[in-house]
Amino acid sequence: MRSRPPSGETGRARVDLLNELGMLLYRSRPLLTEAYAWESLVLSKRLEYKTGLADSNRLMGVSNGARGRYFESMKYFNIAHTIYTELDNKKGMATTFTNIGVVFGSQSRFDLAIDQHLKALAIFEEINDRNHIAHSLNSIGIIFRKRNNLERAEEYYLKALSIREETGDLSGLAMSYNNMGILAKEKGDLESALDYHGRSLKLKEELGDKRGISISYSNIGDIHMKLEEYTSALEYYRKSLSIVKELEDEESISNNCKLIGHIMILLEKYDEALEYLERSLQISIRIGTRIVESDCYRELSILYKAMGDYERAFLFYKKYSSLTKDIFSEESADTIARLQIRYETEQKEKEAELYYLKNVDLRREIGERKLVENQLMAQEQLLEERVRDRTFELQQSMEKLKKSVEGTIQTLSKIIESKDPYTSGHQMRVAELARLIAIEMGFSDERIEAIYMISLVHDIGKISIPQEILSRPGKLSELEQEIVRTHPQIGFDILSNVEFPWPVADVILQHQELYDGSGYPNGLKGDDIMIEARIIAVADVIESMTSHRPYRSIPGIDKAIEVITRNSGILYDPEVAEACIRIIREKGFSLN
């Protein structure tokens, strides 16, 4: 007989224990941490234990972030932050600011990262949490160091180090020694750098911090690299790589592979260098670590130059130059400077506290919307379970499979549109226009049906976007725009494991890509974008410009045609644009 799950105070105590254990283990055992987080999440929902629910979602975000799954981690952090805000839990609010800042920093979105860390710092100073103040100071220092502002980085690092020595936090002290070592290396003081990293490694070994030990190995390898002691550097990098593979830390795996590839170039072992660099590049693109991606392009350019392939060397150097310019743009630097000034001048005005809505009615509305979202997620999970349960039966009859999948698509489409009443019918209209474009372009019946079905759910990723963002009149903030831009990846994640007779998830991932490479999430261009996604992109624009939205009037069909015509061959596939214009101008198609 199965034992009953804990309830009442016993259940809440178990939730708190699971979350506490998860936070202790997330660096060394991220998979176990996720298991703890999931059990805690389920139990918190059953007990209606809001603090536990917030902590569980944050732990899910941390465990996903430790493995480089940044889109998933951001989703959980946003849920946690909403609940902490409802509870007026300032420490919880500040820690999720910090978590989100770390994700943005890993993706080289430095202005967004420093904004989050400054907000966290303001709250921690207000509640006088010394350990977390030091942590925020370290995080801000890291951003300045990555921006090559070593003077400001040292200023923040020294403040954090002073607090760590005062409080006796060994884990934090190891982090401060590590940061000071990296800074000393970049300033050319290699002796001091080795000393700091040696102190850091000793503390991490005492604490049994595997992830921290791997970082120290990698940093000591960097010093040997600077000293041109390549064999020693390679030994430390491989030690670090062995640990992060065990931890399944994709960001660190990518970085160590890049470093080993660099040494192999210096040792003229070009085949091994190519193997490590390609692996690093693949991982960095998948998880969004743009600095590592940029470094890989540079190393591949150096490699092909050494091999005498100047055409490829030039190609990769152009990619490196373009991405580096984007990461370190003047606009981004100006934004960081403005954020720093704002923090210093408005620190005492409790900016972080005023940032959130205090109106009780609005908080209640937020809670109700979150409840609806959770119900939709539950319906989605139930739907997926039903599809999996019927897989064997569906394999016996292709016709039955087709009907079932179509029903699934229709249901998902209704779920999506129930999220935002302002765009009701949007996906159906996009699907109809996309179907006609495919017919006009001479596609087969099977492919036409695929385009129609995929169009019905192309915005499924918006199911995880807060409704107040989707339906808000007026311009969205930069952070809100970043959240909205995650919807193709979220849609891909939702449907990638569901079997369809069409490439549903891949097209959803690409439907916001643009012909010249200026779209998102992966900046694909031209024929690298699937034709189904190119068709949906044009149909999406036409529908959006001929439909009502709460934040603007209807531009109309003539304006829509003008936009498509002007951007044919630039943002939109010229063949798709031409077919769409013929349907509307010559064949009288109307979305109404």
Image: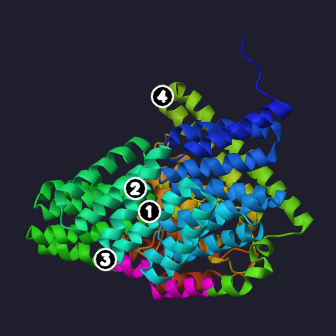
Q: Residue at x 49, y 77 (%)?
A: 153
Helix, strand or loop status at disc 4: helix
Q: Which is closer to the viewer, label 4 or label 1?
A: 1
Judge whether 280 appears above or below 539 on screen: above
Asked where in the image residue 150 lies, by quadrant, the reply is bottom left
Give the prevailing secondary structure in the magenta stretch: helix
- Magenta segment: does it hold 328? yes
Find the distance from the CA under tag 2 to the CA under tag 1.
9 Å
Kind of residue at badge 1: Asn
Q: For mark 4, what is the residue?
A: 395
In the figure, is residue 319 to the left or right of 345?
left
* Residue 188, disc: 3
Marks 2 and 1, the one that precedes in the sequence: 1
- Magenta segment: does it hold 283? no
Marks 1 and 3, the one that precedes in the sequence: 1
| Circle 2/circle 1 CB separation < 8 Å | yes
Q: For mark 1, what is the residue?
A: 178
User: Taking the image as drawn, is residue 442 in sight?
Assistant: no
Find the distance from the CA under tag 4 to the CA under tag 1.
56 Å
Helix, strand or loop status at disc 2: helix
* Residue 215, disc: 2
Kind of residue at badge 4: Gln
In the figure, is residue 306 to the left or right of 102?
left
Find the distance from the CA under tag 4 to the CA under tag 3.
65 Å
Q: Give how far across and how far down residue 250 sits, in percent.
A: 41, 52
Marks 4 and 1, the one that precedes in the sequence: 1
